Image: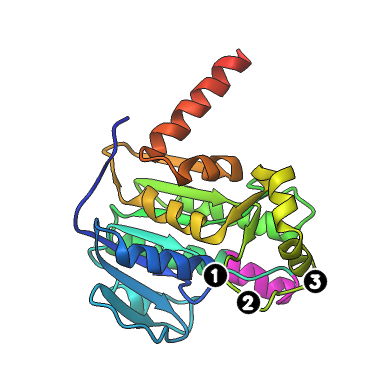
Amino acid sequence: MQSTARAAIRLVIVGTTGMVGGHALRYALGHHSVERVTSIGRKSLGVSHPKLKEVLHRDFTDCSALAETLLGQDAAIFCLGAYTGSVTDAELHTITVAYTIEFARVLRRSSPEAAFSFLSGKGADPTGRSQMPFARYKGEAEMALLAAGFPRVYIFRPAYIYPVEPRKEPNFSYSLLRAIYPAFRLLFPNQVIRADDLARAMVNVVVQKTAERESRVFENRDIRAMVDSPHLLGVIKARRQLHESNRE
């Protein structure tokens, strides 16, 4: 498959006040192939840029009001989410599943040919059998996106996402992981990814021009392989073909 950067991409990003979404926004604004970035979120960014259009939206259980905003979009990057333990189980399901499905519904009607890049997580379980709510809910959201009818869906399943920039960690586990990150990265390189690298991969994959209809799931190892490659999808496809041939 051949992929080349496409000019004049119109990109919508949801969750730009979050860690990964914020990096995705900054990278997209500087990307030569991106003509316009529409940021959708609950809080104002306080950012001004000639490429940027900011839309405030409070209730993601109903995205009908976004129908006009989402007209003519070439791609969407969805980074909205919540940390396990920071909200109730019911809220986690609503944020992880209901918000994703509702946004995808409206985007599909307004821009049926848009590509969709989704921030999932390591261990996401589309079968629904996992004992971990986060894994079940991310898997449920993935399945809904794959069935939504978008021509290209890219699901990212990062492991530990290193924040890069200082922040207040959501819990002790994240504080510990940040503290031991240098050693953890050396010992388990496929279990970590920098937030800015992940964001770049999520943007780059949807600004690639391809006529193929495809759905791809990128595990942490795949994301790391994509970061420095000029031929993102080709690298992953070749890796998988090699893996499959070795299994035969």
| Residue carrying label 1 | 19
Residue 47: horizontal and vertical position, in percent? 36, 83
The kind of secondary structure element at disc 2 is: loop
| Residue at x 67%, y 79% (from the top left corner) | 168
Q: Which residues are magenta?
A: 85-96
Residue 243 versus residue 91: which sits nearer the camera? 243
Q: Which residue is mark 2?
A: 167
Element carrying mark 1: helix
Left or right relative to 121: residue 56? left
Q: Callout 3: helix, strand or loop?
A: helix
Number of residues whose C-alpha sits closer than 10 Å to that of mark 3, classed few (under 14), some (14–19) or many (20 or more): few
Majority secondary structure of magenta residues = helix
Q: CA distance from mark 2 to mark 3?
A: 13 Å
Residue type (three-letter) at the residue carrying disc 2 = Arg
Judge left or right: residue 197 versus residue 151: right
Q: How far from the left and from the top, in percent, is residue 243?
A: 57, 23
Mark 3 is on which residue type? Phe
Measure the alpha-carbon separation of dots 2 and 1. 9 Å
Q: Which residue is mark 3?
A: 172
At a point 72% along the width and 76% down the height, the residue shown is 86
